[in-house]
Amino acid sequence: MAVKKIGTQTVKFNSPPVIIGTSTTVGPKEGEGPLSEYFDIILKDDLYGEKSWELAESKMLRETVKAAVKASGKKMSDMEYMFSGDLLNQSMSASFAARDLELPFFGLYGACSTMTESLSLGSMIIDGGYADNIIAVTSSHFSSAERQFRFPLEHGNQRKLTAQWTVTGSGAAVLSSFGNGPEIRYVTTGKVVDLGIKDANNMGAAMAPSAADTIVKHFEDTGLPTDYYDLIVTGDLAQIGKEIAEEMVLDKGYNILKNYNDCGLLIFDNLAQDTHAGGSGCGCSASVFCGYIYKEMMKKNINKVLLISTGALLSVTSTQQGQSIPGIAHAVSIVNKGS
Amino acid sequence: MEYIRAFVVGGLICVVGQLLMDGTKLTPAHVLVAFVTSGAILTAFGIYEPIMKFGEMGASIPLTGFGYSLAKGAMDSVKDGGLLGAFTGGIKATSGGVAAAVVFGYLMAVIFDPKSKK
Amino acid sequence: MKKQITRVNKEKEYEEYVKNKVPKPNYLLNCLWAFFVGGVICTIAQFINNLLKNSGLNKTDAGTVTVIIMIFLGAFLTGLGVYDKLGKKAGAGSIVPITGFANSIVSPAMEFKREGYVLGVAAKMFSVAGPVLVYGFGSSVIIGVLYYFFIR
């Protein structure tokens, strides 16, 4: 019997796993953004001393894991599983990092939803009694994503106004069955939702329906009021997607206008940094959560957070074959102990 | 005077491209292909020749001008050499530009590295 | 079958809804930039062409040498990392001229250097230029053949 399952898509943990440490690495542009002070490592050069953008991204992920484990006060050998994935073909960053870290590794692909996907699975493993310490980590890199999904860097094209800027960044969180820090109370696993958007330059609109669906399911399943959370934050819907998600959730009778924001809007100053609709990428929600949100939670400035990382499950092949963009969103409810 | 004509004709051709890019879902690659092909077709119908006379480099430098050279080369060669000219003429007329693009393209790629965007 | 129909309606409805949310590009400003930059590039070419003609080259050769020089400039500015910044403002103004064709060759070639000189640089340099050549050469041959049968 699935005793920890509530409603249709939500899990409620009996002994909630604790996030005992996090770390973040971001690129130079993110380091100039509004959340600058919350990031642990800001790279001066986003090639990070490597030969290619892909290797730089993998190194970023690897070093962020090391820093997060150190911050948690544990040893690398205490980590029993690593849950990770990224945007590159066949998850190059995550698997190459896992090779060097020598950890038991579950490779995930959830596009930009990977942060909450890895937190969800990690929490279930811990609450299920299969491990005491796991690491959840993901990354993205502007230059490696750009060449895989869009144009070469030096190509003289104009970005669309709806386009988003892939965040160069990585965020890692160490989950433990015991320790100090905010705990993960609920996990709501999203369904793939696709309302037929085909424009790869408007991923916010493609992902918003799935985010709205998961948010509504979370409140239906848990019965919590929407103002229970200090912050409801989606991964990378950016300007257009955020507006759509707000309205779609409101349409279903849940008002989140007051406490809702989006990591893609938090990480950049869109006008000053010319990032058009906002940030995107796995590293967007990863670095905003593991940096800004986690640190504010440790200071008790924010106590209850619903984090919904959002992913656009497109590929270069699917776009070229004229297919629409399926969206996915997973919600993780993170709450400070005692509140 | 020919400078102003080149400026205006070249500018206007680019505006057509801009409207295509902003108003439709065409990517830069689609726009370039469309311009070469339409340049060749307009030449075949005798429409591009007067534009070329009037705008000079303003009509020759945009990719429609590449299409013009291809079509004109093919037609001229057919006139002189028969059917074989249809196959050799266009490429012969544009071979200098194509070879330059390949050689300079390769050279620059070897010398320079792409820079990350800020 | 019924489910299929409602799904299509829902997608149409959503598409309309999203369309209203999407900010419109500033057509006038974009076109002015494209006009100005495209015009300037062509004027520079005209200047080079005049110089060549004055130095004694015939009209056809002067045209070819001008194109070669413009391609070199486009390729060189791409290598220096200037052309993408120009393209951001100028849009089609720097894509449509032959310098933009050079940019579309050099940018992927540079980008894929780490994948090697054969399957990286040499293969990828034609990712945009290849289609242009295919359709350009293709239409020139078709036009030549039609010309042979119907006009000559």
Image (cartoon, coloured by chain):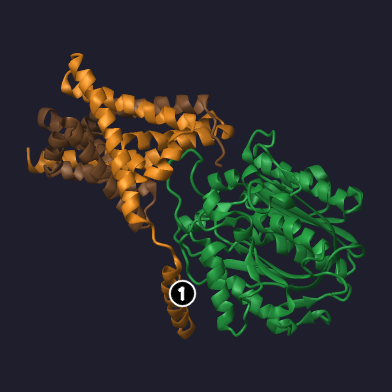
Chain colours: A green, B brown, C orange
Q: Residue A153: x and y, percent? A: 51, 40
Q: In which quarter of the image is the C terminus of chain A?
A: bottom right
Residue A72 image point, x, y percent: 88, 54
Report the side of A79 relative to A290 (left or right). Answer: right
- Whether A277 is drawn above or below C105: the answer is below
Instruction: From the viewer's perspective, tell me whether residue A43 is left or right of residue B59.
Output: right
Residue B62 appears in the rendering: no
* Tag count: 1
Residue closest to the far top: C55
Work out which quarter of the rendered image holds the N terminus of chain A and state it.
bottom right
Q: Which residue is drawn at 54% across and 55% down?
A: A270
Report helix, strand or loop for mark 1: helix
Quarter of the image where one finds residue C137: top left
Q: Which residue is drawn at 82% across and 47% down?
A: A67
Q: Which amino acid lies under the numbered mark 1 shown in the image of this protein?
A: Tyr
- Report crowding for label 1: few under 14, some 14 to 19, many 20 or more residues within 10 A (C-alpha): some
In depth, the one of C136 and B23 nearer the eye is: B23
Residue positioned 38% across, 47% down in the render: B28
Residue denoted by label 1: C14
Q: Quadrant of residue A333?
A: bottom right
Q: In this view, does A175 lie to the left or right of A209?
A: right
Up/down of B87 relative to A92, above or below: above
Q: In this view, does A163 lie to the left or right of A126?
A: left
Q: Mark 1 lies on which chain?
A: C
Most foreground residue, A329 or A266: A266
Q: Can residue A322 be seen in this view?
A: yes
Q: Where is residue A52 in the image (x, y as percent from the top left)?
A: 63, 36
Residue A142, how many percent across, how many down?
59, 47
